[in-house]
Amino acid sequence: MSTNPHSFWQARLRPVLAHPKVLVGGTLVLIFSLVALFAPLLAPNDPNAQDLLATLLPPAWQEGGLAQYPLGTDGLGRCILSRLIYGSRVAFQVAVTAAAGTMVLGTVLAILAGYIGGWFDRGVSSLVVLWMAFPPVVFSMMLMVGLGTGLFNVILAVVLVDWTRFYRVVRAEVLVARQRDYVYAAHLLGFSHLRIMLREVLPSVAPLIVTLFSLQMGVAIVVEAILSFVGLSVPSDVVAWGVMLADGRDQIYQAGWGLMAPVIGIVFAVLGFNLLSDGLRTTLDPRLKQRGAH
């Protein structure tokens, strides 16, 4: 009797999508993604256009505000809402690409080290210990000084700093997975090491990888904002949330809305990814599901 593939996936996905944290976090991430993708259509003004006759205007609902600038303007008369929307594009690109690069590098090394063991495992693990001795933010700043500003270099810096996060967690799971009966059975059947790693070990750690990927996207947004804040991220003509933080810092007492807008954007995006990650971990990890059932 054959099983309907549609019914199978529906039965697997329904409990995941029904989890409150996945639902709320996924909704926040979806909104953030749509804003980033359709920024040119959503922004009411050019984010870099200056109106020196309308500097530090309050939001439209406050006295002195203009409907043309819904969230007010900054010290150069630029529309804060437009800059907030366009800033999400940089955050989204860094979040997705940096998290993907971190996931690939960390997971590949983790599976190889955990499965092969021996000198390879000891060598990579020693490198990770040395790598993590550097404070992540300081390390990323040092890399940006050497690499130079630019979106690609920001992504590269995040990958080089944070791959150890994936490595340590995934390697621990691989060490457990390689002791499973189905892995021993695959050895007895004469399967190659590559096939065992791809067909037996990788699927067993896939839920953990998905969870870490979602979490890493939030981390990447924060790191990019920090680098932008200190002027070590994208060029000055590219709108980023960290750049908005640096611009709003000087007018924090006269026009606090210029600083609060990017803060709210960062919190909104990171909260979405963190909730999604926590919800996926709860629903995809069999041990946590069993614990919740009891």
Image (spheres, rainbow, N blue to C red):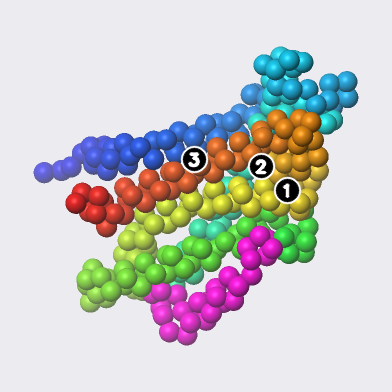
Residue 259, percent across and down? Answer: 71, 36
Vertical order, 74 against 164 (above or below): above
Dot 3 surroundings within 10 Å: few (below 14), some, or many (20 or more)? many
Residue 35 left/right relative to 79:
left
Q: Main secondary structure of the magenta part?
A: helix
Q: Which residue is mark 3?
A: 272
Q: Which of pointers 1 and 2 indicates the residue nearer the eye? A: 1
Q: Residue drawn 22% across and 53% down?
A: 290
Query: Where, by quadrant of the figure, is residue 183 drawn?
Result: bottom left
Vertical order, 122 against 95 (above or below): below
* Mark 3 and mark 2: Cα distance apart in space: 17 Å
Q: Which residue is mark 1?
A: 228
Query: Can residue 20 be found in the magenta stretch?
Result: no
Q: Residue drawn 66% across and 33% down?
A: 261
Question: Residue pushed farthest right?
Answer: 52
Element at badge 3?
helix
Mark 3 or mark 2: which comes first in sequence?
2
What residue range appears in magenta? 113-140
Residue 75, percent across and down? Answer: 83, 31
Q: Amino acid at mark 1?
A: Ser
- Mark 3 and 2 residues: CB-CB less than 8 Å, in contact? no
Along the viewing direction, whichever of 170 and 100 lies nearer the viewer: 170
Q: Which residue is mark 2?
A: 90
Location of the N terminus (image quadrant):
top left
Q: Amino acid at mark 2?
A: Val
